[in-house]
Image: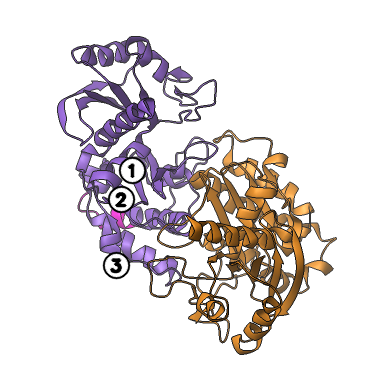
Chain colours: A orange, B purple
């Protein structure tokens, strides 16, 4: 049996299943402090004979296998989780192969294998929710360089009529600072779900997301772009993204029809779980090679 | 003998040499129209027994091997070269394996093999000259997705005291529109070489380049960044790039010491030629597999 851990900032989704992405059982555990959350995570898996574990984690994380802190959640502001040895803690109880990456890279892997980018050797998965992050498959592999990408913090140009200063603790008005869920709520004084009818809310959201997509396209040239996360459940954002992206790129790059190029996740909310099962499967194969 | 063609917008650099990057002979041919330039290119190589050819070309080019226009220079505004079958024209005279990529991807390959990023499986090569372009090695391969990257056109935030509107025909004030050589000349009314003492010129240049590097780092996380091209011969730009990049990233990404992370080409002006020889060598190996 393979185990999947989608370690998020608000909840851990734990599941057992197979390398086809079939899930046998799944639970959610609130992300409080490690001393509370981790024992519940471990207890859940103890019921099963686990062969390998895949972890897609909130970040930043250390994904460099040569590093002394490989498997750690590193500089997160989340209390208790800074410099937390996530892989090591799991491995104490389950000494099996463990695949480890960011939550968004896991989701990108899930979508490229069984979802909206199935069969492609290149895709970009972006989540717009409590934060903004992205993972990518490049020429068949999860993108990694010096470390994993941190695409949510790209700089965008403030809309001339948007007085909101942004809320990123590092960059104020980077993409995440202007367009993640908490920024929407703070700017408009209400949660997204209460703003459904306010088209200006979603047009502005599309304005910022389109700018980020322009950068991603110019730099990575992905074969498919998948936009997930809570904010993107407001489907009306997509048409604003298409319109602004067309306006910004101005014909410079020859792209497929945007409505088939920039899409919702094919796996819905399961991309991260399926991707984590695939990370487990890859880890198991790596061990057996 | 391997042949290298660095097809640039102002000149073609043609060379013969080996897969170690050793050059036996090299010539430069002005890029006028194909009917003038190409016969000279072909004549030069006729003297040698050519086993394979590597071409690093100005773009945009079609690098998708499954495409009907693979090997073409596509939508360039340069008269005579739009939709020009570069690889096919060469192949008519030299029916040997041909490796084909962008000029900047070739340079990135050269730098990753024998230059400033030697031994690394990841680097970014940026040229700031008549235009701005970048190539990248990601996990050991030249970056390619839907097509090759077009990183020179990323959006940057205009400096509040820079009234210059930019000159990119597609985006006005994208990076290339604000910071390539012709933009420097138009903004300040003199060529870069006459502006050496004007520190404000180079500080502004560093301001824009640093913004682009921030995007590249957040999206690609390269292990080394190489800044080449005519404008970067003004070495004073580097310290402005370091300072602004530090200010913009604000500690969010843990980077090596910037003066060893962002560097000049290790191969000087030869990165493109050496990279093209390597493209030829790869094509030859591919054929023999």
x and y, in percent, of residue B40 in the image? 25, 13
Q: Can residue B106 be seen in this view?
A: yes
Mark 3–mark 1 distance (CA, rounded to whole Å): 21 Å
Do badges 3 and 2 share one subunit?
A: yes
Q: Name the residue under label 1.
A: B108
Q: Are marks 2 and 1 in contact (CB under 8 Å)?
A: yes
Could you confirm whether marks 3 and 1 are on the same chain? yes
Q: Is residue A215 visible?
A: no
Q: Which image quadrant for residue A254?
A: top right
Q: Mark 1 lies on which chain?
A: B
Was residue A92 drawn as part of the magenta stretch in this picture? Answer: no
Q: In this view, does A135 lie to the left or right of B197?
A: right
Can you tell which mark lies on residue B257? 3
Camera-near label (2 vs 1) is 1
Residue A35 rendering spot, x and y as whole percentages: 61, 89
Where residue A182 appears, x then y in whole percent?
A: 68, 72
Residue A200: assigned label: none
Q: Callout 3: helix, strand or loop?
A: loop
Q: What element carries label 1?
A: helix
What residue sits 42% from the left and 15% below the top?
B88
B229 relative position to A162: left or right: left
**Cβ atoms at labels 3 and 1 below 8 Å apart:** no
Q: In which quarter of the image is the N terminus of chain A?
A: bottom right
A126 vs B182: above or below? below
Start-end of magenta stretch: B195-203
């Amino acid at each position: 049996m393979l185990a999947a851990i989608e370690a998020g900032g608000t909840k851990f989704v734990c599941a057992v299943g197979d390398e086809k992405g079939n899930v046998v059982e799944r639970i959610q555990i609130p992300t409080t402090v490690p001393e509370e959350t981790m024992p519940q995570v471990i207890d859940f898996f103890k019921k099963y004979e686990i062969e390998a574990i895949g972890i897609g984690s909130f970040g930043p994380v250390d994904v460099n296998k040569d590093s002394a802190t490989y498997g750690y959640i590193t500089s997160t502001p989340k209390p208790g989780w800074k410099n937390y040895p996530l892989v090591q803690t799991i491995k104490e109880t389950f000494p099996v192969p463990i695949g480890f990456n960011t939550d968004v890279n896991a989701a990108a892997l899930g979508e490229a294998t069984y979802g909206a980018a199935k069969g492609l050797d290149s895709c970009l998965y972006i989540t717009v929710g409590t934060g903004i992050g992205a993972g990518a498959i490049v020429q068949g592999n999860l993108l990694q360089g010096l470390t994993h990408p941190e695409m949510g913090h790209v700089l965008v140009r403030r809309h001339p009529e948007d007085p909101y200063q942004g809320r990123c603790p590092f960059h104020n008005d980077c993409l995440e600072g202007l367009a993640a869920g908490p920024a929407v709520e703070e700017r408009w004084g209400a949660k997204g779900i209460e703003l459904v009818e306010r088209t200006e809310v979603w047009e502005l959201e599309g304005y910022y997301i389109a700018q980020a997509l322009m950068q991603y396209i110019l730099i990575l040239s992905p074969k498919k772009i998948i936009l997930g996360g809570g904010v993107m459940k407001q489907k009306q954002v997509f048409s604003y993204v298409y319109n602004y992206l067309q306006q910004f790129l101005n014909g410079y790059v020859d792209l497929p029809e945007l409505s088939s190029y920039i899409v919702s996740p094919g796996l819905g909310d399961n991309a991260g779980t399926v991707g984590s099962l695939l990370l487990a499967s890859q880890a198991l194969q790596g061990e057996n090679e």
